[in-house]
Amino acid sequence: KNQVEQSPQSLIILEGKNCTLQCNYTVSPFSNLRWYKQDTGRGPVSLTIMTFSENTKSNGRYTATLDADTKQSSLHITASQLSDSASYICVVSAPNDYKLSFGAGTTVTVRA
Amino acid sequence: ETGVTQTPRHLVMGMTNKKSLKCEQHLGHNAMYWYKQSAKKPLELMFVYSLEERVENNSVPSRFSPECPNSSHLFLHLHTLQPEDSALYLCASSRGTGDNSPLHFGNGTRLTVT
């Protein structure tokens, strides 16, 4: 079983609306959690990174939250734009370990 | 641009062909990685190099052969592949391994094995 589970697998939203993506993980011990955005035909690009002591981090219209006690994270997209259409990948790392645990991603489609 | 360049962007090859994927990073990083990305699946780590030394092989079939001639270049040599090897192959680099520095990905090579 994958140590990082993301939901939903995909979603469609109208331009201007908000949405929230979920990430649950079982990785332990825990070092940090990153959200990546992957546009079609491109490699993933880092959006946010949060360590154990951080419970929220923003990057423009993207806000990530982390609850290290329940091992859950969310990524909230505010006032979605067509350019937000992409796959969003949750990645969890353990201390001093290059073997990252990747979620399968959530595909977001923003429609006009 | 990401600072990590992969070529070719697309590759179609038969099962008996031999081809190579190339990756170059311009970020001064010491670690380079090959990942396989299949549809609706998590990224799978294939190979890791730190300062040109391979540190991870991750049970990858021998039909995939990596080469790291220096810290800026990484190759993936392919021979006698199977149709199930069709996927997006992503190269990434980071400052180091184990220091939790972020990965910088290239845009990948879309490989189709016929």
Image: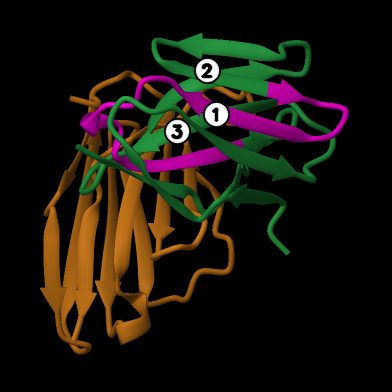
- Location of residue A95 by image quarter: top right
Q: Nearer the viewer, residue B22 or B82?
A: B82
Q: Is residue A68 above or below residue A50?
A: below
Q: Are marks 2 and 3 on the same chain?
A: yes
- Residue type highlighted by circle 3: Tyr
Give the Cα separation between the discs numbered 2 and 1: 6 Å
Q: In what element is the residue under mark 3?
A: strand
Q: Which residue is mark 1?
A: A75
The chain coloured orange carries which letter?
A: B
Q: Residue at x 14, y 78 (%)?
A: B13
Characterize the local packing of mark 2: few (<14), some (14-19) or many (20 or more) Cα atoms within 10 angstroms. Answer: some
- Front-most of A25 and A20? A20
Colour seen for chain A: green
Is residue A67 highlighted in magenta?
yes
The reply to whether label 2 and label 1 mark residues of one chain is yes
One can see residue A45 in this view: yes
According to the picture, the residue beneath numbered tag 2 turns out to be A63
Q: Amino acid at mark 1?
A: Leu
- In the displayed structure, would residue B89 be above or below residue A70? below
The percent coordinates of residue A51 (x first, y second) are 70, 17
Within the magenta stretch, is there residue A72? yes
Indicate which disc, 2 or 3, sits on the residue closer to the N terminus.
3
Residue receiving disc 3: A36
Badge 2 sits on which subunit?
A
Q: Position of residue A9 (x, y in %)?
A: 50, 55
Q: Is residue B95 visible?
A: no
